[in-house]
Image: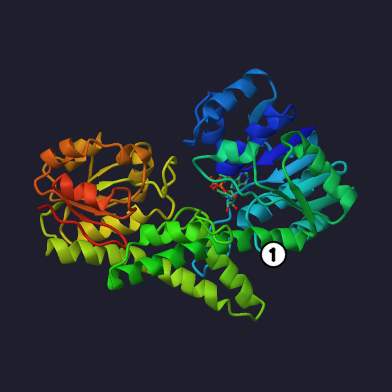
Amino acid sequence: MNVAVVGTGYVGLVTGAVFSDLGNDVVCVDKDVDKIEGLRAGRMPIYEPGLEELVARNVADGRLTFSTDLADTVRRSDIVFIAVGTPPKATGESDLTAVEEVAHGIAEALDRYKVIVNKSTVPVGTGDLVRNIIERNRRRPVNFDVVSNPEFLREGSAIEDTLRPDRIVIGAPSQQVAMTLLELYAPLERPMIITDVHSAEIIKYASNAFLAAKISFINEIANLCELAGGDVTQVMKGMGLDPRIGSAFLNAGLGYGGSCFPKDTDALIQTAASLGYEFRMLRSVVDVNRERVQRFLGLIRKVLGPLEDQVIAVLGLAFKPKTDDMREARSVELIPRLAMSGARVRVYDPVAMENARRHLSVPIEYCQSSYEAAEGADAIAIVTEWNEFKLLNLERLRQVMRRPLVFDGRNIYEPERMRRLGFEYHSIGRKPAFPN
Ligand code: NAD
């Protein structure tokens, strides 16, 4: 099939690369000229394990190309995926400017029947909006259909998730229209569910809101453990083995960040409000998450006292491991507050350092390794649970620090082990450990 993917970000580029790998002719379009030129030269705009090889292979085989010309790409395609960003507005609603822009562009170029697929995360009713824009602005009286096909990939395992999704949701106006997408996805041999367009749009938000709720729930249990003297990691294990609950997204820590959960939870609250419904539970989920960094900062202040001139090594900047994505990363909330309190902040992340420079404007020192960041530090704060940090030589780490103090915002170490190694160790929802 001839496939166009509009928006060459985390979702669009991975989707385009995977569809081309399945044997389709794919053109990835973006309005960002630098991005497209970079991709043509073999430079990936994002870090995603396996992406560079996948793109290179399909470009070399002539199935994957890149363009800035939306009209030309639309004309060559049977299916057009919209995978542009839908960032939050100040009100928490989704900003649909990019989706609307693309819908206008498609309308002008529409020359024969095509299926337009919304892959961006968009509020319920956006399928209707796209349909109306195209209907009103098309130059020729040709038919088209609008389908919702929300994306569930996770950054860091985006290719694997796209090749082996748990489910493929196709929200289509009819079975016949859904068939085009069924055919495209058939080689993956994964479960597919066909719904109406509105339900598909809601499935995406409901899924993200539910996962965010799990995270806030276990974080509240962590707060309770701290007061009652329990261990949240044990509680989580005991809960997670119940198949009705499951252990995924049940880790206490600094809460959720990233480009999806914060904006999607806010957007769902706004969608509900616009329909006259107050989503009370989701409001609490968001409130609990908002308090996480402040609480962690309170712990650091309580233990260290005034932060003036204290050296704090922050390990992990990306919003989660295996990505360089800094959007809504907890580090972006924590580091300026540390710096503004007078702390000297030294940071290290395995892949997000370059992006971090664009997100952090306070003066901080970027280091080449965890050990370099910890050199002479009064404390370490672990913000992202990279595997690399779990495997650190902790003996060596302790030796380079001025004070062997660790604040672990992600519970990556065992308190008893840290005690034995001579650290003062504070984590989330567990008793602190002190060296003998
Ligand atoms: P992104 O910001 O990485 O990429 C979006 C791309 O769209 C950018 O390259 C931008 O230049 C391009 N773009 C914007 N306006 C355009 C236009 N008018 N014409 C052509 N290109 C245009 O975003 P992303 O993370 O890939 O997310 C895309 C959508 O997918 C969002 O709605 C997001 O919520 C959703 N989503 C993201 C993830 C994720 O993990 N990142 C997962 C599931 C769903």
Quadrant in which residue 276 is drawn: bottom right
Quadrant of residue 372 in the image? top left
For residue 187, side relative to residue 54 (left or right)? right
Instruction: From the image, tell me which residue sits under label 1.
Output: 124
Q: Quadrant of the N terminus?
A: top right
Residue 310 rendering spot, x and y as whole percentages: 12, 54
Place of residue 168 in the rendered image (x, y in percent of width and height, measured from the top left): 71, 47
Furthest-top residue in view? 60
Figure check: 111 above or below 100: above
Residue 124 x %, y %: 69, 64
Give the color scheme: rainbow, by chain, secondary structure or one colour. Answer: rainbow
- Residue 253 is at least partly visible in this image: no
Judge whether 345 appears above or below 72 on screen. below
Q: Could you tell me which residue is drawn at 30 percent across and 37 percent down?
A: 391
- Name above or below for residue 158 compared with residue 56: below
Which residue does the image show at 37% across and 37% down from the upper left?
Answer: 351
Q: Is 69 on the left or on the right of 194, as rendered?
A: left
- Between residue 426 and residue 340, name the one nearer to us: 426
Residue 257 visible? The answer is: yes
Kind of element beneath mark 1: loop
Please indicate whether residue 393 sits to the left or right of residue 67 in the image.
Answer: left
Q: Residues within 10 Å of mark 1 (few under 14, many from 20)?
A: many
Question: Where, by quadrant of the figure, is residue 293 drawn?
Answer: bottom left
Residue type at mark 1: give it: Val
**As drawn, is 356 to the left or to the right of 78?**
left
Query: Where's residue 362, x and y in %?
Result: 25, 52
- Residue drawn 85% across and 41% down? 111
